[in-house]
Amino acid sequence: MADSTSGSILRKKLAAARAPETDGGPGADRSWRLALARAARDSIKLALDVTAMTMRRMGLAEMLELVPERALIAVLQGPAESLGVLIFSPDMLASVVEVQTIGKVNRGAPAPRKPTRTDAAMSAGLIDAALERLDIALEDEADLTWAGGFRYASHLEDARPLGLLLDDADYKVLQAQVSLGLGQRTGQVILALPAEGCCAASSQDDADVPETSPHHAFAEALAERVEGAACTLMATLARLSLPLVEVTDLAEGTILPLHTASIDRIRLEAMDGRILGEGRLGQNRGMRAVRLSEKAAQRASQPAARATAVAPAVAPPDPPETLRAAG
């Protein structure tokens, strides 16, 4: 009887130990669960267990409502310049920082504070390690088309710029509840990636074009020409006309009203004033950036049209001799 009881207890312990490995079903949800836990263990020696995982499809506005206050917001860049986001709750971020500075996770909630650039730098390695493991786990899975190929690009101090930085499209959101430091603390990790991915599609497109094809040779020649050319563009938020007397009176602290300015309509202009495109103001790797929109500038060809209008007309040919003789 004693042997039977001890054997039953041992089987229960083994089943409990295997539960995190088998929970979650196939695809990105289970793969992300394992990738996150193993990356935390191997890269920063953080004991992390995913206690619950949900995967939902939602719009940008709905996804932004999930961002906790004072969370670390990491912007991810993926195939075809697509953008995603990975969010550490304050408890998760504090645990990542503590285990790398003091070697352990403190019990209880951390003191409230805003994430810093240093916090982002200390988290970037873990983020990339987890995303790399996710890629490997999804090599033979259909979810690779939307969940593969993303890496850490930059971080945001708060969630307000996300609405401008990310495309207004559907996102697949993996929301994980995690236990940290062998139960010392609990936290949350949110991974949101564009629902319509292009990782596998872009790889297939590249495979369909042989390197020796005329198209490939032309693309290489064109790239060599373009990369050697210089082009100066100006990003214009708004234009303002003032009398010369007001311009000469401008001083530090003067406020100029820009009634037509809008950060989601930034014009890209050439040196001759032509409007080449439009975009919206955003951020990339901590610097200001303009994300181009598909809308083409309607006035891009106006200078060429004016040049044609003022070109001298060609003189008509001389009349034939028979008409000249007839008068």
Image (tube, rainbow, N blue to C red):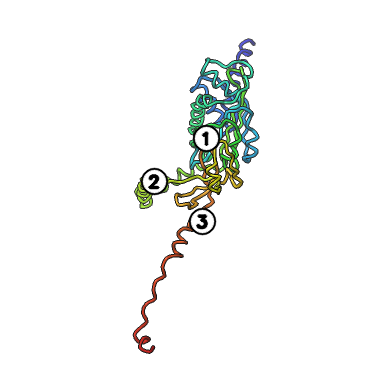
Query: 310 or 18: nearer the eye?
Result: 310
Is 1 above or below relative to 227?
A: above
Query: To which residue does mark 2 refer?
Result: 230
- Mark 2 or mark 1: whose residue is earlier in sequence: 1
Estimate how packed mark 2 is, as few (under 14), some (14 to 19) or many (20 or more) residues with alpha carbons within 10 Å: few
Q: CA distance from mark 2 to mark 3?
A: 22 Å
Is 238 above or below relative to 50?
A: below
Estimate how packed mark 3 is, as few (under 14), some (14 to 19) or many (20 or more) residues with alpha carbons within 10 Å: few
Residue 168 lies, in percent from the top left, at 60, 43
Q: What residue appears at the point 49 percent right and 58 percent down from the top-left corner? A: 302
Regarding residue 142, the answer to whether it shows in the image is no
- The disc label shown at residue 299, or none: 3
Regarding residue 125, the answer to whether it shows in the image is yes
Question: Split into 4 quadrants, where in the image is the C terminus?
Answer: bottom left
- Mark 2 or mark 3: whose residue is earlier in sequence: 2
Kindly indicate the quadrant of the structure image that contains residue 30.
top right
Callout 3 secondary element: loop
Dot 3 and dot 1 residues touching (CB under 8 Å): no
Amino acid type, mark 2 = Ala
Question: Split into 4 quadrants, where in the image is the N terminus?
Answer: top right
Estimate how packed mark 1 is, as few (under 14), some (14 to 19) or many (20 or more) residues with alpha carbons within 10 Å: many
Q: CA distance from mark 2 to mark 1?
A: 29 Å
Residue 88 lies, in percent from the top left, at 58, 27
Q: In front: mark 2 or mark 1?
A: 2
Callout 1 secondary element: strand
Q: CA distance from mark 3 to mark 1?
A: 35 Å
Query: To which residue does mark 1 refer?
Result: 76
Residue 248 lies, in percent from the top left, at 52, 43
Callout 2 secondary element: loop
User: Seen from this angle, which residue lies furthest bottom?
Assistant: 326
